[in-house]
Amino acid sequence: MKLVLLSPEGWETRLINGRQVLVVPGAVGDEPDLIIEIDPLVLLPDNREQWLGSIVLRDIPEGVNARVMNSIDTAADLCWPMQLVHEFLLSPEGKLLETRIAALYRFFEYGTAALVRGRNAERYEANRPKLLEVLASGRPDWRGPEVVALADLWAWDGQEAR
């Protein structure tokens, strides 16, 4: 199983630093200033706060302050549980360095995340409605080996589960 996100026309999928990212149109060069990083699927840990922290606080340079603005429990379009966390990274002087939205998805005992990273505040704000729409489109793609491994847990064609 993997996470599937809506990819609006003109947006580009890339592999940056070993991570699959969705690049928003208008980004220039190899280091886009507005991207969505897509995490692999993992078994949910017992400590969800630690898992959340490992996602929203990823790759923060020393001396940079992270301020979580709000956290909202909601659902993706197909009613899968989703938590949105808005965060700002500030320099020691208080200058905005990066705006982030982490979307955490839960599918039964599995979880994954998409992390929006915006270095250009104007482009981030201009694209924010579309970014939230993309994050809300998150759904599991059940095709793959995990489905076969979990098939015995479910009742198919009216048969009892084992």
Image: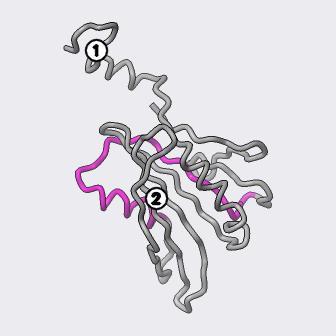
Quarter of the view holding residue 13: top right
* Residue at 29% over, 19% down: 154
Query: For this view, does 102 lie left or right of residue 106?
Result: right
Q: Position of residue 125 (x, y in %)?
A: 68, 68
Residue type marked 2: Leu
What element does badge 2 sit on? strand
Residue neighbourhood size for the residue with mark 2, other residues' Cα within 10 Å, grouped as few (<14), some (14–19), many (≥20): many
Residue neighbourhood size for the residue with mark 1, other residues' Cα within 10 Å, grouped as few (<14), some (14–19), many (≥20): few
Q: Position of residue 105 (x, y in %)?
A: 42, 47
Q: Position of residue 10 (x, y in %)?
A: 78, 45
* Residue at 48% over, 37% down: 78
* Residue at 32% over, 11% down: 156
What element does badge 1 sit on? loop
Up-down relation of residue 147 to residue 47 (above or below) = above
Q: CA distance from mark 1 to mark 2?
A: 33 Å
Residue range in magenta is 30-58
* Residue at 56% over, 92% down: 93
Q: Which mark is residue 80?
A: none
**161 or 113: nearer the viewer:** 161
Q: Mark 2 — residue?
A: 84
Query: For this view, does 40 lie left or right of residue 13?
Result: left
Residue type marked 1: Ala
Colouring method of the image: one colour
Q: State yes or no: residue 44 in magenta.
A: yes
Q: Quadrant of the C terminus?
A: top left
Q: Which mark is residue 155?
A: 1
Mark 1 or mark 2: which comes first in sequence?
2
How many marks on residues?
Answer: 2
